[in-house]
Image (cartoon, rainbow, N blue to C red):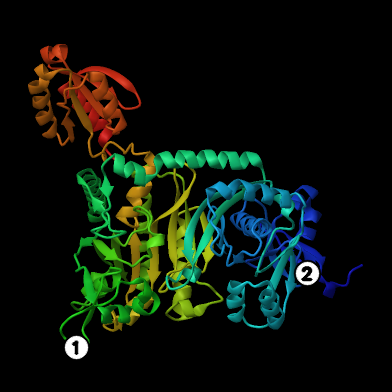
Amino acid sequence: MIAQDQLIHVTLPDGSVREYPKGSSGLDIALSISEGLARNVLAAKVNGKVQDANLPIDTDAEVQLLTWNDRDGKATFWHSSAHLMAEALEALYPGVKLAIGPAVENGFYYDVDFEGRHFSQDDFKKVEDKMLELARQKSEYIRKAVPKADALTYFEEKGDPYKIELIQGLEDGSITFYTQGGFTDLCRGPHIPNTGFIKAAKLMNVAGAYWRGDEKNKMLTRIYGVTFPKQKELDEYLHLLEEAKKRDHRKLGKELEIFTFSERVGAGLPLWLPKGALIRERLENFLRKAQVRAGYSPVVTPHIGSKQLYVTSGHWEKYGEDSFKPIRTPDVDEEFLLKPMNCPHHCEIYKSKPRSYRDLPLRLAEFGTVYRYEQSGELHGLTRVRGFTQDDAHIFCRPDQVKEEFMKVIDLVLYVFKSLGFNDYSAQISLRDPENGTKYIGSDDLWEKAESAIIESAREKGLPTVTEKGEAAFYGPKLDFMVKDALGRKWQLGTIQVDYNLPNRFELEYVGADNQKHRPVMIHRAPFGSMERFIAILIENTAGNFPLWLSPDQIAILPISEKYEDYANELFFALQEQDIRGFVDLRDEKIGRKIRDAEVTKVPFMLIVGEKEQAEGKVSVRRKGQGDLGAMSIDEFTALFQQEVKP
């Protein structure tokens, strides 16, 4: 019989509470539930913190046993795989210098200094084979606390300057090593129990990366990889990547003439071509109409702002390094910034005249273009750019209105998603990092109010949610909408944020019913997020087959020969009057070629005209993906079109 003071109470995710001897590990808990679970446990989340599955638990705790099906389980698996790849690299390339090797969203990477030796995709196969050879040894990942002096000595003797630099920045007593097989690395963990879980490995890419992201430091070789517990899962993943390549918005954006980039204009600054501009215009008009119905007022703010504006808001302190360098004027001490966000400008609009409680909520909306400095290596098509347009709005309301306004914004975001076919989504409640309060501004009391408003609103709306600590904005918590695309990938699109802090910093006020001055609460909101990223994801989700109402060219009128060009043009002008967009293909090509080209450029409707169609005043209609729909009069086609075109 174990004494009560030697027992701990473990609360499992289903709410059940079990007793275990003090010092039991996650693996012990898994084994008490089932041997099958124990065989699949990769790590344990104890009171919200992921740790090795074999580490002892000495106090009452909430415990989640992590498997491959959990995001944190995958991250642990891939972190351990990075160590396995590093072990393989040391075996194949003696003397390489290792930097860092974290897990990333889909796999892992390791930054390596090959000291002048060339490493390319031709070397991938032998590294993969070595990784699997080492994995089959089922070496345990063994954790060991190491005094700082001993840690420095170990890597000095090994000759690893990057590890030495990392250790020099750590506090004595906080340093741990992990060893598997013949390889030891500086690491906080956690790791999977042993290498035997890793059954399939693939190196994906090799690129350059400056040590610690600083262009002044040495360029290292960054090797990306991915691993799986089954070969079948790797095969499925690689197939998914092939499908993703076909849908890559950078490829389709060029082929469909939606956007382009120019070195002379500058990296990360997209140029929208006529078809892309039409898509943007349609999206903006769609949201503008929804915002008018929801009581928003449009505003416009300049592309620059005084540096002092962003000092007041707190953005300069938190994000100054991500801004473009200040623009200096001939006046001494006068500096401006390219606008990195819209909210400080909207605060000043609120402050432009006295406000009463009767004026609230005040909803200000703007499609505002902002500019942020992204390092060239981080730029990626439209998803990571230096200039982008946010469908931004800020709601200034009384504290008693926060919940209702927040729920209305949720309704607006869901309306946007439904209209564009984004039906598979979840909501992420992004809260403060409880261990790092320096990342945020404002009092604990205000943060608790804001977090409670988000949690209660999401619950009442019945949203499927996950909670992530440490993902809040510096001024307030967020509800981020994570959308799954056609390939099962997750993207963050819409976001809603509750902010008690900026109104304080800008000293915003309204006169209440008690004739006293009060602070409003601010809700930040962007259903699309940014037009650039949203359109990139829309391109990939639809593979360029946009909803009819968004398609830049909705019809292509295809005359069989030049004899029917006049009739084709008459039809085109008649359909333009019905707000149906497209073109007449007047090229001297056979009709089969014209149809194929229209299909390739994703035109939804092809209207074929020849002798019979002209004589009967009709068109032969083809629908992309459906084929021939038969002959129709213009009125019949217009009715069909109008029925399908509504969002």
> Is residue 384 shown left or right of residue 468?
left
Q: Position of residue 219 (x, y in %)?
A: 48, 66
Q: Is 408 located above or below residue 473 in the figure?
A: above
Q: Is 143 located above or below residue 556 in the figure?
A: below
Label 2: element kind: strand
Residue 202 in view, yes or no: yes
Given the image, on which type of amino acid does mark 1 rest? Val
> Is residue 246 shown left or right of residue 330?
right
Q: Is 640 located above or below residue 509 in the figure?
A: above
Q: Position of residue 543 (x, y in %)?
A: 37, 38
Q: Which residue is mark 1?
A: 332
Q: Which residue is mark 2?
A: 8
Q: Position of residue 60 (x, y in %)?
A: 73, 70
Q: Residue at x 80, y 69 (%)?
A: 23
Given the image, on which type of amino acid does mark 2 rest? Ile
Which residue is outermost to the front?
116
Q: Position of residue 518 (x, y in %)?
A: 31, 81
